[in-house]
Structures are given as structure tokens and as C-alpha cells.
Amino acid sequence: MVLDGDLVAQNWKFDGYHDGRPRWMWADDNDNPDDVAAILDLPLERVAMVHERVVFVEGYHPLDVTRGHIDGLARFISEDEVVIPDDGTALYDTIADQVPDLTIHRLELVDGDPTLNWLVGDGFVLTGSTGDSSADAELAVDLGGYFPDRDIHFTDVGVVWENGGGVHCVTNYQPESR
């Protein structure tokens, strides 16, 4: 984050999604911000709060081991626009009904599709591949409509996806210093 014009790393607590898995599975995860701060020679601010869910909505996909990480249910594409999946189930209609003050875009997904979990960077969007080139081509058109000034890139996120994450979950945004 940028604090008083200076770039500062923050370490928010990580609780392993409350899913009952053994704590050792994430034993070192909370050390990552410390390591990044050391590598980049940045001051480190510790935040004594779990900061995984900012927008609360009821419901989650049964395949979601995080039990409702919002970036699998909805993604902001601007200050007042959000993309919500449409896979033919009632879940995402329920999610859409819970954010009435936003413009909602529906993105057709297949079951277990990792593509909503994307990273927006300078000039690009990186998302998980569906493994189907024609489906990825359709998704590139959709994402290109949401992010017209960015190139769309795909990557295989199979192992990350099987463990409850996607591109967005294993990357972080780093703002510029001012």
C-alpha cells in the first residue's frame, strides 16, 4: 500500500479459510509478506486482522474449498460494475440479488471454471485456462470487453485450482510509490 507517499508492505493474518484442514498446510503462508518486504527493502506494517473477505454475500460453490472467497463469486471491473458467473445454477442468481447497487455483468462459465479468478495488471489480464481453446477464445472476447485496453493471457492453474485458488489468489497488486 502507499502510506504518506511511500510504499509499505502489509501483513494481514491468514486463517486458512476456516475449512478444517490441518494448520500445517499453511504454516508458512503468513511469512510471505515479511519475505516480500525484505526482498524489496520496504517497511512492514502488521495488521492484526484476517482480511480475506471484504464483500460478504451468502452462498458458495460446493467445489470451493475456501467456502466463499469472493473472487470466485464476483469480481469488480470498475468502481460500480461487477462480474458474476452464470453457470445455470441458482447460486449466482442469489449472489447477484445481494449486490443491487452495482451494475452486474454475467459471465457464462462451466462447472469448476477457474477463469473468474483473474489478475489485472498494467496492460494485461491474466486468467486461468479452461483447457479448451475455443472456450478460452470466447472468454478472451468477454474479458476484452471488460478491459479493452489490456491484452488477455491464459495460464494453466490446475494445481492451484485443485487447492482452492487461482491466479488472483497467488498474486498481489503492488502500487507505485508517489
Image: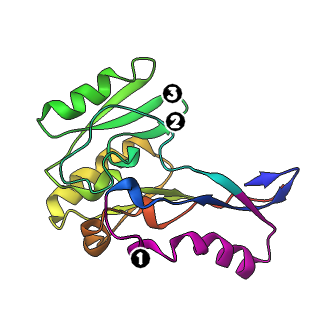
Q: Secondary structure at mark 2?
A: strand
List x then y, in percent, for residue 166.
36, 62
Q: Residue at x 42, y 61 (%)?
A: 16
Label 3 environment density (alpha carbons within 10 Å; few <14, some 14–19, many ≥20):
few
Q: Looking at the picture, how far across and down is residue 68, in whole percent?
A: 33, 45
The residue under label 3 is which amino acid type? Asp
Task: Tell which of 135 and 100 is nearer to you.
Answer: 100
Q: Amino acid at mark 1?
A: Trp
Measured Cα–Cα span from mark 3 to mark 2: 5 Å
Label 2 sits on residue = 78
> Which label lies toward us, 3 or 1?
1
Look at the image and say whether residue 21 sits in the magenta stretch. Answer: yes
Q: Farthest residue in the bottom direction?
A: 39
User: At 36% across and 27% down in the image, what residue appears?
Assistant: 104
Q: Nearer the viewer, mark 2 or mark 1?
A: 1
Q: How is the image coloured?
A: rainbow
Q: Are marks 3 and 2 in contact (CB under 8 Å)?
A: yes
Q: Residue at x 72, y 73 (%)?
A: 37
Over which residues does the magenta segment extend?
Answer: 20-46
Q: In the rendered image, which residue does mark 3 sit on?
A: 80
**Residue at mark 1:** 24
Task: Give SS at disc 3.
Answer: loop
Q: Quadrant of residue 132?
A: bottom left
CB under 8 Å between discs 2 and 1: no
Residue sitting farthest toward the right: 4
Find out whether residue 146 is within the magenta segment: no
**Mark 1: secondary structure:** helix
Disc 2 residue type (three-letter): Ser
